[in-house]
Structure formats: C-alpha cells, structure tokens
Image (cartoon, rainbow, N blue to C red):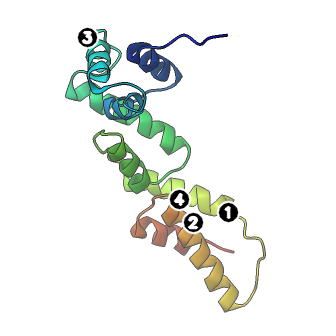
Amino acid sequence: MSRKSTTAESELLQYLARRDHSELELQQKLSRRFDTEEVAAALHQAKIKGHLPNSPQEVQALAVRMAEIWHRKQKGLHWINGHLQQRGLPPISSSEAAELAKARSLVNNWRPRSVGKSEHQEAHMRAKLGRFLHARGFDDLIIGKALAEWKS
C-alpha cells in the first residue's frame, strides 16, 4: 500500500487541527520535510485563509491561549515565557498573587518520601522543594514566599 505524498499546506493544517501552533513552530516542523519555498507558500496561504494570526493582537491572543494551558499545568511564569519565546511568541505577564497561588498549591500537594524531624532533614526537604519549584519556572521571590509557609 503506497502512502500519498502530502503537501506542506496539508501537513500544516494537520498540525493546526491538533493544537495551536505559532508560525515559527510550523516553519520549523515543515522545514524538516519540505523545501523553503513550499513552506513559505504554505505559511502565506494559512495566513490568507485565517489559520494563522496576522496582526500583533492575534499573535498576543495566541500567546495568551498557550500560556493558559501551561498555567493550568501549574508552570511558573519564567517557564511559560521561555517556552513562548522558543515558539516565537511574545511574553505574557501574570500577577504575583496568581503565581504565588500556583506555587502554594504545588507546595501543599508535595509529599516528601520520608518526613524527618531533624533540622538537617527539614533543610534537605526544603531545598528539594525549592529546586522542584525552580524547575517548574517560579522565580526566587515566589519560591521563598511559598517555602516560608510550608510545613513538613
């Protein structure tokens, strides 16, 4: 059974059917299989047909939609903005209260494997939790405030 050859435009539409993609993401994915001219033509057609954002407001709206998904996954603002930048999208802003609420939720749901009573074990767990929050993209101020409220 032979497989039909796909065009860059049809593959672009398949990517967009799965989830929102930025123009940069699509360009990177399509350039793996298609030549530069075909990729450029497919991106141009997608913009004309309204499948890709044309204005800065539409690009910002796309960034906000993608960020909302990552906010629900409790990623920190630094992580979110880093991933938006990788996708060629503008950074978003978030209130300190919202970031602190996400960090608190993660801290409150975090269960260490072994709960110790000594100060050394407490410091070890606090450091481990701080690294966990840092890896999720929270800044040091938010991490400090969340850890100050944490009780092992």
Check residue 110 in the rendering and tell me which mark sits there, or answer none. Answer: 1
Residue 48 rendering spot, x and y as whole percentages: 26, 11
Looking at the image, do the residues carrying marks 4 and 1 touch, with CB atoms under 8 Å apart?
no
Q: Amino acid at mark 2?
A: Phe
Q: CA distance from mark 4 to mark 1?
A: 10 Å
Which residue type carries mark 3?
Ile
What residue type is disc 4 on?
Ala
Compared to residue 45, the image places residue 147 above or below, namely below
Residue found at x 41% / y 33%: 32
Q: Nearer the viewer, mark 2 or mark 3?
A: 3
User: As shown in the figure, which amino acid type bears the numbered disc 1?
Assistant: Trp
Label 1: which secondary element: loop
Spatial distance from mark 2 to mark 1, Cα to Cα? 10 Å
Residues marked 2 and 3 touching at CB (< 8 Å): no
| Residue 132 tag number | 2
> What numbered label is drawn on residue 103?
4
In the image, is residue 19 above or below residue 145? above
Determine whether label 2 and label 1 are within 8 Å by CB. yes
Residue located at (47% from left, 23% from top): 15
Helix, strand or loop status at disc 2: helix
Q: Quick one: which residue is furthest to the front in this view?
A: 2
Question: Mark 4–mark 2 contact, CB under 8 Å?
Answer: no
Q: Earlier in the sequence, mark 4 or mark 1?
A: 4
Depth check: give the residue in front, 120 or 29.
29
Label 2, label 3: how far apart the Cα atoms are:
43 Å
Query: Which marked residue is nearer to the observer: mark 3 or mark 4?
Result: 3
The residue to which callout 3 is attached is 48
Q: CA distance from mark 4 to mark 2?
A: 10 Å
